[in-house]
Image (spheres, grey):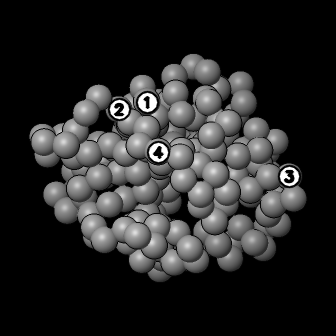
Amino acid sequence: MLHDWLNRPHIVEWWGGGSARPTLEEVYAKYLPRILAQDRVTPYIAMLEQAPIGYAQSYVALGSGDGWWEEETDAGVRGIDQSIADPQLLGKGLGTLLVRALVEKLFSDPQVTKIQTDPAPTNLRAIRCYQKAGFRIVREIVTPDGPAIYMLQDRPGSGHDRR
């Protein structure tokens, strides 16, 4: 299922580009350690009325490696990524609901201080989704995947949260 989703054009466009279509073996190699809790990334399957509709993941930003978040010093920062699998479900507010649910779950852990995300500057649908879910644009950055918009949501009540 995840292999199929990761090869859909509307997901490939933002998750690695057309040349990054993963093989089934590559999906197993990358995502199986996450499923087995052997990785710093936690995977989730988004469900709607008992049907899987999307993939999400959270990760500890500090110490991500491979050029990611090298300046981060706060062990409480989590990053998120997600996608809706079926293009027919885009534009219906489900992405915003998914992000809000993931943020709520992550903030249920008292050690989580902030949640970050980094959509491509041209991914206006994702940027708007994150804004509707309470994220603020901080600045444009360059990641190992290229230019991105760094967005944050602070723990509610932290004195830093702004919506």
Per the rendering, the mark at residue 139 is: 4
Per the rendering, the mark at residue 131 is: 1
Label pair 1/2, CB-CB below 8 angstroms: yes
Q: Which of 123 and 35 is in front in this view?
A: 123
Q: Nearer the viewer, mark 2 or mark 4?
A: 4
Q: What element carries label 4?
A: strand
Per the rendering, the mark at residue 54 is: none
Q: Distance between the residues labelled 3 and 1?
A: 27 Å
Question: Relative to 108, does residue 157 appear above or below in the rendering?
Answer: above
For the question of whether residue 81 can be seen, the reply is no
Q: Where does the image place residue 82, in percent across and percent down from the top left?
A: 55, 46
Which is nearer the N-term, disc 3 or disc 1? 3
| Side (left or right) of 23 relative to 72 | right
Q: What element carries label 1?
A: helix
Q: Name the residue that disc number 3 marks.
A: 18
Q: Is mark 2 on a helix, strand or loop?
A: loop
Q: How far apart are marks 1 and 2 (CA)?
A: 5 Å
Q: How far apart are marks 1 and 4 (CA)?
A: 14 Å
